[in-house]
Image (cartoon, grey):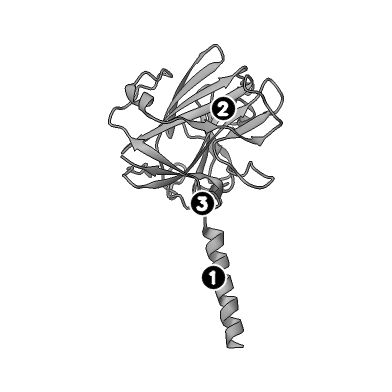
Amino acid sequence: MKWTIYLLTLVSLVSCTEIKTKKNSHITPVSFIEEVPTLDGRPIENFWNLLEWHPIDQNWIGGPFDHDDFNGKYKIAWNRDGLYLLLEIVDDTLYKKSKDPLKLWWNDDCVIVYLDEDNSGGLHQFNHNAFTYHVALDGNVADLGNDKNPKLYNDHIKSVHETEDKTTYWEMFIKVYPDTFLDDSEIKPVVLTKNKKLGFALAYADNDTSTERENLIGSVFISGENKNNGWIDASVFGTLELVE
C-alpha cells in the first residue's frame, strides 16, 4: 500500500513538472550590439550585415502560398535597453482595412511579436505573463489588456518600415516588460543582461484584400493541429539567449 501511494505521488510530481515545462525547445542566440540603429526602415548599419538571418516560414493558419505571395526572415540583436529587430518581408500586397487600431487588427497585414520576459511559458491571454504585440502598418501596437479589452502599447515597440517593389524592411526597437506589468502602471522595462533567456516568436499576418487574414506565418515550429496558440499560451514560444 505504501509503495502504491509513493508511486502515485511520484507520477503526480512528474506530471506537474511536465505541465510547467516549455513545449518548444528551440533556442536562438542573440548578439549584443553597442551601436544603436536608426529606426528608418533602411538597414544600412554595418552590424546588421554581421548578423544571421532567421526564417519566418511556418504556416500556422491558412492554405499553401507561393514564394511570390510571401516570404520572410528576420535578424535580432540586444543591448541593455531592449531588443532590436530587422525583418525582410516579401509580400505582393500590403493590406490595411480597419481604420480603428483596436478593431479586427489581426486581419490586417501586420507583424506579431510574441514576448515572454522570464521565458516561463504558460497562459497569458488576459494577463501580461507574456505579450502578443500586433504591430500594424501604421505603427500602432495592439494586444489584449489585463481587463480583457484591447489596448495600444505604442510605448513598448517603436517601428518604421520602408517598401520598395514587393519587399518591405521593418526596423523595431522593443522594450521588455516583466510579467508583473499591469496596464496604467508605472512598472519600467527590465534591463537586459548577458545569458538572460526570453520566450520569443514572430509571425506575419498576410491578407491580400480578403475579409479575414489568409495566412499567419510564424518563426517557430508548433506541433499539433492548433498552431495559432501563441496568443494564449507562451509555452509554444521559442527561446532567445542573450550573448555577447
In this figure, which residue is indicated by the disc labeled 1?
13
Image point (58%, 78%), residue name: 7
Secondary structure beneath disc 3?
A: loop
Q: Do callouts 3 and 2 mark residues in contact (Cβ within 8 Å)?
A: no
Q: Is residue 50 visible?
A: yes
Instruction: Report the residue that reaches farthest toward the bottom.
Output: 1
Residue, disc 3:
121
Q: Residue at x 70, y 32 (%)?
A: 62
Task: Indicate which disc, 3 or 2, sits on the residue closer to the N terminus.
Answer: 2
**Left or right placement of residue 173 versus residue 221 in this view:** left
In whole angstroms, how far apart are the C-alphas of marks 1 and 2? 41 Å
Determine whether, in the image, residue 74 is placed left or right of residue 208: left
Q: Residue at x 58, y 46 (%)?
A: 125
Q: Is residue 76 above or below residue 139?
A: below
In this rendering, the label closer to the viewer, 3 or 1: 1
Q: Quadrant of residue 19?
A: bottom right
Q: Amino acid at mark 3?
A: Gly
Q: Marks 3 and 1, Cα distance to the nearest angstrom?
A: 19 Å
Point out which mark residue 110 bears.
Answer: 2
Q: Residue at x 52, y 45 (%)?
A: 237
